Amino acid sequence: MPNDVALSILWHIAPVDTLAGEHTRAYLDTLTKPPGSLGQLETLAIQLSEISGNPKLTVTPPSVMVFAADHGVAEEGVSAFPQSVTAQMVANFANGGAAINVFARQIGARIEVIDVGVATPLDLPSVTRAKVRAGTANIKISGAMSRNEALAAIEVGVAAVERAQQAGAKSIIVGEMGIANTTASSAMLAVLTDVPVAQVVGAGTGITSAQQAHKVAVIEHAIDARRANPQDPLDVLTKLGGLEIAAMTGAYLASAAHRLPAIVDGFIATVAALTACRLCPDVRGYLVFGHQSEEPGHATALEALDAKPLLNLGMRLGEGSGAALAYPLLQSAAAMLNEMATFADAGISDKTGP
Ligand SMILES: Cc1cc2ncn([C@H]3O[C@H](COP(=O)(O)O)[C@@H](O)[C@H]3O)c2cc1C
Ligand SMILES: O=C(O)c1cccnc1
């Protein structure tokens, strides 16, 4: 097993409760609706029952956590924006002005912003200081970080979920901010899935097609030079990943360990989720996929996880925004199961026989 013993969280992850899911599946057919007519909402209710193991579903309150970090590979010109935007956006999160702040307020979520590796020093009282290092190294030139740094960043994600849980969270929304992180995520995904780089690379923040061809070349060079072992997800994270991607991986591991549903956001989040599932396949049952991003590699990552997202709004932002927008559907699934009348309660005739 490639898993480091240092990742003790892995020993706390149990499979979801499929028996509880079976009970919910049967109960759903007793509710006053044609069987199966609530479609994906019914699948979601079954999954939420498997996660909690409890016939009464609670997903409220949700908790949002946004991990921020920089990427040395930004110096290769792979993003439409300069590296300094990572720190500037962290300040924007702290002031409540980013898209994720707006959506977190809308759904009544606590939000925590965590500096796990922003390149410049930050002095913002509302931002959690957990800098493992000041940005990764440029993956074209050397490994992104050391294995110990990757483990430390994973632990930052684990600790953030534990704080959220202590604050009463019943569902977890994980987001990120890091200029050039679609480059790191694409590199990781190409290695983890053995899909050609050109198939997973997209425009990220909005680069031109010429810049996109350059981004593919940078990633191909990095993959050839780093020789990450596809069978060892921690090696892929260490050599090609990012500090916020590692923290997100840790957050998904901890959500599973604490039996909390985690809503996965877009491309970067799904690559982190795939990394968590490769470290421990039982994590998959705790993940709900919020939306389908426009970034082309997202389809590859979702396919690798056999995942069907709830929404498709043509979004490509990150920050946890698509996951926050999907959260009300978890509330609806829970309310449907908890509150709908059964045929017997309502005195309505059940389906006629076969
Ligand atoms: C103002 C601004 C706000 C953002 N919020 C999320 N991202 C998103 O864009 C970045 C990834 O794209 P790339 O790999 O092309 O740099 C990440 O920070 C991601 O969270 C943003 C990007 C910008 C510019
Ligand atoms: O899907 C995402 O999360 C995404 C896509 C482009 C840029 N930033 C994030």
Image: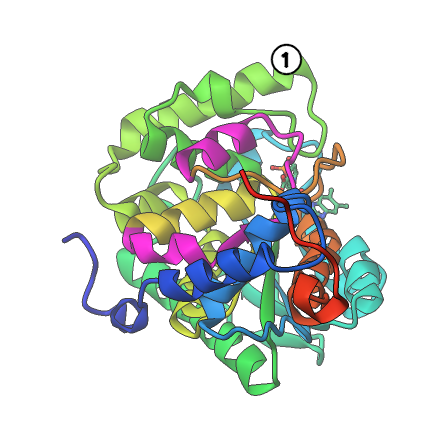
Q: Is ligand 1 less than 8 Å from the beta carbon at label 1?
A: no
- On the picture, is 334 further left or further right than 157? right
Which residue carries the number 1 mark? 210
In the rendered view, tell whether residue 141 sits above or below residue 94.
above
Residue 145 visible from this viewpoint? yes
Q: How would you rate the neighbour count of disc 1 (Cα within 10 Å): few for under 14, some for 14-19, many for 20 or more?
A: few
Q: Residue furthest left?
A: 1
Task: Give 312 or 166, whichever is nearer the viewer.
Answer: 312
Query: Magenta span has 56?
Result: no
Q: Which residue is depicted at the point 37% across and 35% down?
A: 141
Q: Which residue is depicted at the point 76% across and 36% down?
A: 313
Stretch in magenta:
279-305
Query: Magenta span has 280?
Result: yes
Q: Amino acid at mark 1?
A: Ala
Q: Position of residue 32 (x, y in %)?
A: 71, 57
In which image quadrant can residue 352 be found? top right
**Quarter of the displayed picture in which ligand 1 can be seen:** top right
